[in-house]
Amino acid sequence: MGVYQQVIDAIKQGDRFLVASHAHPDGDGIGSTIALAKGLESLGKKVKMYNADPVPYNLKFLPYSGEVVSELGPDEKFDVTFMVDCSQRDRIGGDAAEIDRERLGKLILIDHHKLNSSECDIVCIDVDAAATGEVIFRLFKAMGLEVTKEIANLIFCTFVVDSGSFRYSNTSASLLKDASELVEAGASPWAISMAMDESNSPCAIDLLRMVLGTFEMRDKTAWVVLTQQMFSDSCASEDVAEEFINYPRSILGVEVAMLFRQLKPEEPASSKSAKGGSKEKWKASFRSKNAVDVQKIASAFNGGGHAHAAGCTLEGDLASVKERVFNEVRKCLSA
């Protein structure tokens, strides 16, 4: 039995579903969450959409985004729980990470990242897919499920985010074919682009100005730094900085771009933290252009991701964090 059929059978057998993605959600996490939930609802299922953090400001235009909740009731139980774009419960965070395993029912993972380990009962992963939304689209086609205009826009958004607006190396012929089918189903590339890329607040631009002021470059590596003080000084929200790493990445000759973002003291790490002597925590994001596999850099600190986009969380002061990361980057550049 193929894995898609296993997922389909679990859907047929269940009545109450939970769909959750990783904390600090991006367009693939949120778009996949809502698209899958609405597909399940069209089958008459009862579905709750969960994320530990609010929907980012530039994704609130997505249909049904206001239905995503950040709390679960103390007595809620589910027949099936879908983890989308997130292979570990601790990366989901909040109530969904703390809830008793039995209350989650059958645990199903839908993802496009390489898997190290998982507690899920069914693992539906396609590492050749550009986005988790692409895996969900294939699941819907296997089910013969109607893709409405709303679902088409949700899935198209996942494509845009994880393929860099169809510019990254994961932009395959199959992705473009799927994108064409979504446009035929009612997705609006222009509306999505306007909402995501041309709706910045003055506070977000002020924050970007501060971040670009930290720009540094060494050999074929460039990076910027984002501190909590910058958020305070700019009055910008935490969710506006997701794409800032693309600025150092865009520089001619740069092979590895990095963004070091200081986490709040109470903010949960998105992955297991590397050992360090300080309580200060930093999220390091990595992007590469060609031959460098930044997933290897992230995995050295218990992080993960893809060959050209990855991340991890480290403890320590900024200087020591950067030095530890640079040591790994140098290994990859010289390989």
Image: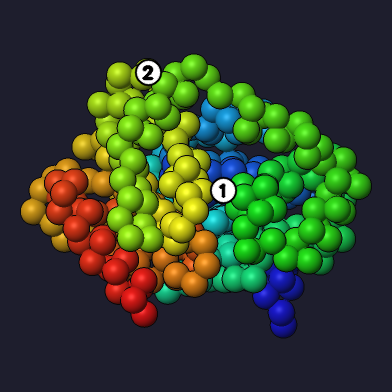
Identify the disc placed on residue 224: none
**Residue farthest left in this picture:** 277
> Where the C terminus falls, by quadrant?
bottom left
Residue reaching furthest to the bottom: 1
Tell me which residue sits at (44%, 19%) in the image. 203
Residue marked by disc 1: 29
The quadrant in which the N terminus is found is: bottom right
Residue 157 visible in the snapshot: yes
Q: Nearer the viewer, mark 1 or mark 2?
A: 2
> Pointer 1: residues within 10 angstroms few (<14), some, or many (20+)?
many
Q: Position of residue 330 (x, y in %)?
A: 29, 69
Element carrying mark 1: helix
The three-letter amino acid code for the residue at tag 1 is Gly
Please determine whether, in this image, residue 331 is positioned above or below residue 219: below
The relative height of residue 174 versus residue 264 in the rendered view (above or below) is: below
**Relative vertical location of residue 117 with respect to residue 217 in this rendering, above or below:** below
